[in-house]
Image (tube, helix red, strand yellow):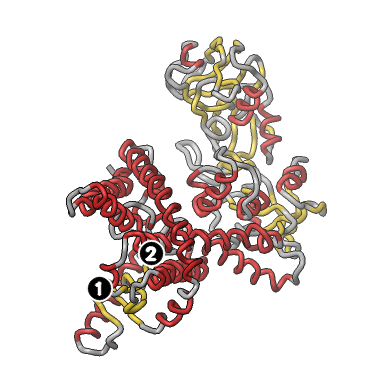
Amino acid sequence: MGPLAWVLVGSGCYVVAAMLAQRRGHLPDWVEVSGPITTVHTRRGRRLLNRLARHDRFWRGFGTLAVAVAFLLMALLAGVVLVAARAALSGAGDTAVARPRNTLVVPGVNDFLPLSVAPELLVGLLLALAVHEGAHGVLCRVGGIEVESVGVFLLGPIPTGAFVDPDDATADAASPAVLDRMFAAGILTNLVVAAVAFGLLFGPVGGAIAVAPGAAVGGVVDGSPAADAGIETGDRITAVAGESVTDPADLDAALADGTCAVPVELNGNRDVTLRRAVTVADSTATFQRGTRLTSVDGEAVCTLTGFEAAVGDDDRVTVRTDGGAAHELVVGARATPTAGGPLSSAGAPSKPFTVVRVDGERVHSTDALLAALDDRSPGETVEVVAYPDGGSDPRTYAVTLGSDGDGAAYLGVVPQRGVGGYTLVDAGVGTYPADEMLSLFRGQGEDPFGFGPASLLLVVVLLPMAATVGFAPYDFPGIEGSVANFYTVPALPAPLDGGVFVLANVLFWTGWVNLQLALFNAIPAFPLDGGKLLHTSAGALGERVGAPDRTASVVAGLATLVMLGAVTAMLVGPML
């Protein structure tokens, strides 16, 4: 069974056991079970709330600011939810992010929350719930509302919320302004905690972390020479042929000489031999993954550089595999013209073919095609030579290049990776951008969205799903698991690095959960704080203009229905 199934089975067993224990009177009075919901009450926190509420002047100012912030977020989030719902219904939201399982903040169930970060995430969640409800309780006391009890509630065995139980009589007698400040306080408190957590992460804690020397290995192609050599995800390549490697650029330079067998040092303490071979990385109709291409027109090859040199200016070549089979290939950039694009307008059919030349320049791969276009300008006319799939004769097109919107030359094709549609590797190591990911983790680096400082905050929030969103090649849920080998804390002995990484992860997830909880509660829908704020404010405004007593309930109810429908569309839309 998958993680989600185990969570459901475990939760079901817990719920059944809890309900039986309550029915037989084995639970204390302060624990209540109602179906899958378990509520734990206590009166012990009231003394602390009273003590904090003594600073009433500060808290009234804080509550007033919270109301302003909350209404701003309510308007913003209502728009965001509606736009997201429209995108989901139109198919634009059909991504892994939109899957229902990924709305659950449950490590191992949510695709972007690995089980390894569960302890740090739980710390952030409990702190977020505590300060959110604590702020409600303090503002209750400041406004003269009695607090009956405080507590937490669980969905099955999973903590999902906290609560402050106000006295109904004093709450009903409170003014709308008191209620507004009380409802909004939790939102602003979560934002403050998020700001503190991210401030510490972006400042002293993140600043103490550095990238460890070597080329970080983010992935290894199955059946590749690297896999055969025992190189694994999470390793660092620290030397090649006796020359030190400090980053991926050094690795590329070290492997550029075309040597077939090279000694490689991993993590500064293990030596292996990398026996390079031109290897098919993805299964196709012609080749299985891991197939080795050993020769081109009878010339032995073991590297991609050697493969391209053996092909030379020939369009068609015969390659042999390690199994002895011979195959004829058109070596070039396989692509499909886009309808209405420059190449299509030049007469190319909208069917896959392989580009072998651009203005007389030999093109061996998709990367070479993109490089050739980089040297051209929009409006320039170039000669493109290509072979249609299954065709034996090339076709030539005179293409007037378009613009891609950024001023770059645009041919109008959808390219496939690799050589002739085949992804070929000679080592099979995918390097990990450790320096780039650390910069993003610290709130630095380039702005991928163009929103200025707000972009960097958005980047940090989206780091756990960075690869899916598209601004980084890997998801980054923190410095955990194999990724931890890519980083170090220079000021401390190596055995203490892990403690700093745990602290950084706790700060990251504390900031992340608090920000998410604040934004979620600001959605104008019951039973969220945003919906309660809308209800009290609509009621106060209705009294001033002489509207019927039910106005507040109608306004809040309509807003809740709209938001509920929009959220449902976000979850269900991608599956339609």
Q: Quadrant of residue 28?
A: bottom left
> Horizontal and vertical percent for residue 474?
55, 50
The answer to whether residue 553 is left or right of residue 141 is: left
The answer to whether residue 242 is left or right of residue 232 is: right
CB-based contact (under 8 Å), mark 1 and mark 2: no
The disc at residue 465 is: none
Task: Choose the circle earlier in sequence order: 1 or 2.
Answer: 1
> Horizontal and vertical percent for residue 331?
59, 27
Residue sitting at 68 percent across and 46 percent down?
276
Other-residue count near label 2 (Cα within 10 Å), few / some / many at <14 / 14–19 / ≥20: many
Residue sitting at 61 percent across and 12 percent down?
380
Residue sitting at 70 percent across and 73 percent down?
495
The disc at residue 169 is: 1
> Horizontal and vertical percent for residue 139?
41, 68
- Front residue (pair 168, 94): 168
Q: Secondary structure at mark 2?
A: helix
- Front residue (pair 205, 293): 205
Which amino acid is tagged 2? Met
> Horizontal and vertical percent for residue 131?
46, 69
Query: Residue lying farthest right?
Result: 242
Q: Quadrant of the N terminus?
A: bottom left
State which mark lies toward you, 1 or 2.
Answer: 1
Task: Please determine whether, in this image, residue 398 is positioned above or below residue 421.
Answer: above
Q: How many marks?
A: 2
Taking the image as drawn, is residue 200 in sight?
A: yes
Q: Secondary structure at mark 1?
A: helix
Label 1 to label 2: alpha-carbon separation: 16 Å
Q: Which residue is mark 2?
A: 182
Task: Please determine whether, in this image, residue 325 is positioned above or below residue 431.
Answer: above
The answer to whether residue 3 is left or right of residue 192 is: left
- Front residue (pair 206, 388): 206
Task: Please determine whether, in this image, residue 90 is positioned above or below residue 215.
Answer: above
